[in-house]
Image: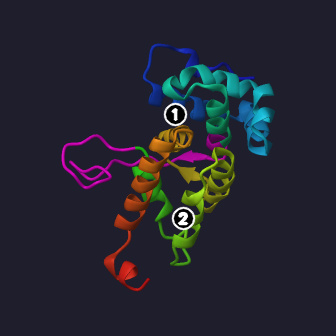
Amino acid sequence: MSPDPTAQKPEDESAATERWHAWLQLPGMKGERAALRRAQQVEEVFGVTAYHALQPRLGRWNRPLTAARIAMALATIRQDRTESPAEGEDADGMPDKPVSWGVTLGRALAVMAPSGKRRVSKERLRLLLSADDPDQFLRLLRSTLGLLDDRAPVQDVADVVGAWHTPSLRADVRRTIFLSYYRSLPVSEIDNA
């Protein structure tokens, strides 16, 4: 197994998560990544070394079941798709507020496919965000990430999966993803719905 580059501390939580994801993409980590991708149940992740490299670095999301679900979701992402928010804007369109969890994921879900259709349809988005159970949400999210050509914002996905475990945070994230998705659509597409 390749040396763990996330072992260098101190660093902030998002940098650690992104470094772990980059480490997981190395050729020597193919088996670890495959084990996380193949896992169907959260308990299967506890025997994967890569999970144990991530879990203590997750800060607020380091509880074992939460960290396992985050590892399962991030393993489906091949390439980090980070983007900056519009200058001075967050999910609510209010200036000078920090960016909320789910903003970049919502925008990524609204991206057009080469076919001219949205990679993730409005119906698929509603199905994904209607899940209250973290395991059901994870299952739907993993298949949805596949529609994005396995490119998604790593840190935002980690935060969304982590937040899904708390009902009040889940409601906030759900709203943020919906708003971000629909704000990424042209008005003509919303009017023709």
Residue at screen point 72% across, 32% down? 29
Quadrant location of the C terminus in the rendered image: bottom left
Camera-nearest label, 1 or 2: 2
Say if 130 sits above or below 88 in the image. below
The CA distance from mark 1 to mark 2 is 25 Å
**How many numbered discs sit on the rendered protein?**
2
Residue 85 place in picture, x, y as percent: 31, 50
Colour scheme: rainbow
Q: Residues within 10 Å of mark 1 (few under 14, many from 20)?
A: some
Residue under the image location 54 percent in, 64 percent down: 125
Q: Quadrant of the N terminus?
A: top right
Q: Which residue is mark 1?
A: 18
- Kindly state the secondary structure of the residue where label 2 is placed: helix
The image quadrant of residue 131 is bottom right
In screen coordinates, is 131 left or right of 159? right
What span is in magenta? Answer: 73-100
Q: Which mark is residue 125?
A: 2
Q: Quadrant of residue 178?
A: bottom left
The amino acid beneath tag 1 is Glu
Q: Position of residue 154 (x, y in %)?
A: 52, 42
Q: Is residue 141 magenta?
A: no
Q: Label 2: how many residues lie within 10 Å, few (<14), some (14-19) or many (20+)?
A: some
Q: Residue at x 54, y 39 (%)?
A: 158
- Circle 1: element type: helix
In the picture provided, is 88 more to the left or to the right than 170? Answer: left
Q: Measuring 59% from the left and 64% from the top, which residue is drawn there? A: 127
Residue 89 magenta-drawn? yes
Answer above or below: position of 46 versus 161. above
Picture coordinates of residue 115 (x, y %)?
A: 56, 77
Callout 2, which amino acid? Answer: Leu
